[in-house]
Image: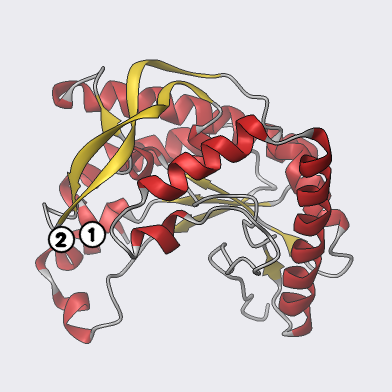
Amino acid sequence: MPLQTTVIGSFPKPEYVKVPSWFQEAAHWDSSVATRAYTELQTKQSAEEQAELEALTVRAEREVIELQTGCGVDVITDGELRRENYIHYLCRFIDGIDFENLTVTPVRNGALHIALPTIRSKLSWRGPLDVAEEWRHAQALSPVAAVKYTLPGPMTIIGTLSDAFYGGENELALATDLAAIINMLIRQLAEAGCRHIQVDEPLFARRPQAALDYGISMLDRCFEGSGAGCEKVVHLCCGWPNPASTRSPSRMHTAPMT
């Protein structure tokens, strides 16, 4: 069988899609701007504004899909154009995560401090995000290639939130609650017919010991019951585009996972 090609997930948003981009603001060291702007977008849009944004987003998704299929990519995505970033979009549909009162938190081993959404209580699914319907919508725009749906993994979600409820000693409990939510969504996708489901876990490379201690088992839990027809995909990061990064101690420590 020929080697299949795919993309990781996200594409740059065209200027006409006015969805705040977390990483664009993070480049200026203030990701809270996009976080608060996306919250305002969700809560203060009129019905007419929502309909207009939806039409423009569908236009952009069609363009992204046509770009990928035109290049001959076998397994494509919708570009994740509805998302402020690939992690927090999902978190907004989980009870227990506060997007109003952000907490300034050190990240990247203290290299910078950013304002993050905060866990205030035990996590549970609230919705109303329908991942199966999102996938069906994207697949309908792609008559040629299979569409892959992407979800952030437990460790990666933990790495982009401030925890004011579980506590560091209970990180496994937090990861377990997240894995249960992700598993529910993956089952919904599989039942809808989605055959390519990706869990993003770049934090495996940044926290290799935690990945070995519990991250891999939580990943197994995420995909539990997805069925033999599900092509399970995991996205890991291998560092910045610098040859030295591939030889760093954490990368070497992570090698046994592969």
Q: Quadrant of the N terminus?
A: bottom right
User: Which residue shows up at 35% across the image and 58% down it?
Assistant: 26
Say whether marks 2 and 1 touch (CB < 8 Å): yes
Mark 2: amino acid? His
User: Which residue shows up at 52% across the image and 33% down it?
Assistant: 182
Q: Position of residue 189 (x, y in %)?
A: 70, 39
Q: Position of residue 160 (x, y in %)?
A: 33, 43
Q: Position of residue 33 (x, y in %)?
A: 41, 48
Mark 1: amino acid? Pro
Residue 176 relative to residue 51: left or right: left
The residue that mark 2 highlights is 253
Q: Is residue 213 at least partly visible in the picture?
A: no
Q: Is residue 250 above or below residue 34?
A: below
Q: Secondary structure at mark 1?
A: helix
- Tell me the number on the disc at residue 256: 1
User: Which residue shows up at 34% across the image and 65% down it?
Assistant: 27
Name the quadrant containing residue 96: top left
